[in-house]
Amino acid sequence: MPITESEPIARQAIPEKHRNPKKILMRLPSWVGDVVMCTPAMRAVRQAFPDAELVVEGKDYQADLVVGLDSVDRFLVDPGRGAKDIWSRSRLVKKEGFDWAILFGESERVAAAPYLARIPVRAGYGRGFLRRSLLTHDIPRPRDDEGKLLAFSMIQRYLNITRMLGIPDAGDRMETPVYDGARATVRRRLAEVGVQDEDQIVTVIAGAAFGSAKMWPPEQYAAACDQLLEQRGWKTVLAPGPGEEQIGHEVAKHSKHGIHLIIDPTLRLSELAALLVRSEIALSNDTGPRSMAVALGLPVVVPIGPTEDGHTRHHLGRQRVLIEDIECRPCRERICPLGHHECMTKITPERMVAAVDDLVADVGTGLPA
């Protein structure tokens, strides 16, 4: 039987002596957007075990996405990917004395340390024999009746793990913390590039860690933002992530009116959250900061090209998703294999601006009251 988002199967009952954990490790997934999309599952764990210590593990920069949430008591930094790092991590995890490990990350490496530390309950998705052998509780990746992987909301995908453990949902609202210190930093950085407190801004997320196939062309972002300045008076702010600085320069090169680039240094994720809070709206590729904006309640317009939109088909009331229905999409490739990138280039700046107009007419600008 295929596993669906509403019917996860518990492969193994939890022994009675392990049903009331006092200390739970929750391992974050790798991508920024996925971290944000697993916060409803993290909140469900907190609601089910309010007195347990919840320790979240991830890459160092991911701390900005979760520290301060009610579902996080402490954050552990993953020491790295090498074999020595796995042994180091397993010793640390064993010393902590966790009762459960809930693994939102799906690699064998992520599951290895909890296995070596002999954490009694180790739960997550099974992806092949080795990964399943490292877990005590696993569910298959969701597939349809023909055996094809299902592209459904990642929020539901992560909630399936907690549902498998008998944990009731605590809603599907995503969360992203916003820190006062980050707000102050962003205010200063905006002033440095010529944006004053009274200016209205649109934040553009023009990069994508996944690959260039996910990126709407820089010249089209520039054209859309020029129109928004002319029609609404909104200044455009770009704050590219590490390694994406050239994309920001490309957008600026094609802009008639100029944009405001925050680059040196690039913003931390906590500062990006503060920038989004400061914005009227965001224009974003289908990448991690899009999920941050949605979690904050900021209106977002998203051009989607090579990827399955089903993974992020949630909380669409304050979003407009632009898709060009061409035969070759979704190809799921990082770089367009045909070289034309028409799934993105055929989405025009005028269509982007029309989507902004429609969204603003529907929900307004900025965060919900």
Image (spheres, rainbow, N blue to C red):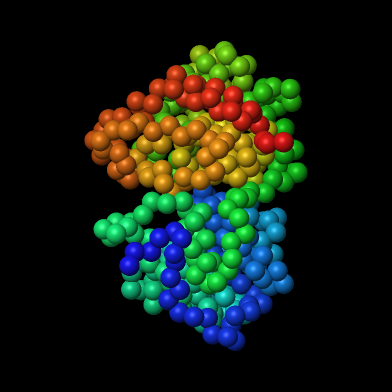
Residue 168 image position (x, y, % from top left): 59, 65
Residue at horizontal 72%, vertical 32%?
Answer: 188
Q: Quadrant of the C terminus?
A: top right
Between 17 and 282, the residue placed more toward the observer is: 17
Q: Quadrant of the N terminus?
A: bottom left
In the figure, 366 relative to 242: above or below?
A: above
Between 42 and 109, the residue placed more toward the observer is: 42
Between 46 and 282, the residue placed more toward the observer is: 46
In the figure, 150 relative to 160: above or below?
A: above
In the figure, 44 relative to 225: above or below?
A: below
Image position of 59 (left or right of 196): left
Residue at horizontal 69%, vertical 22%?
Answer: 199
Residue 159 image position (x, y, % from top left): 52, 61
In the figure, 146 relative to 126: above or below?
A: above
Residue 143 image position (x, y, % from top left): 34, 59
Residue 113 image position (x, y, % from top left): 49, 74
Q: Give the quadrant of residue 130.
A: bottom left
| Residue 352 visible in the shown view | yes
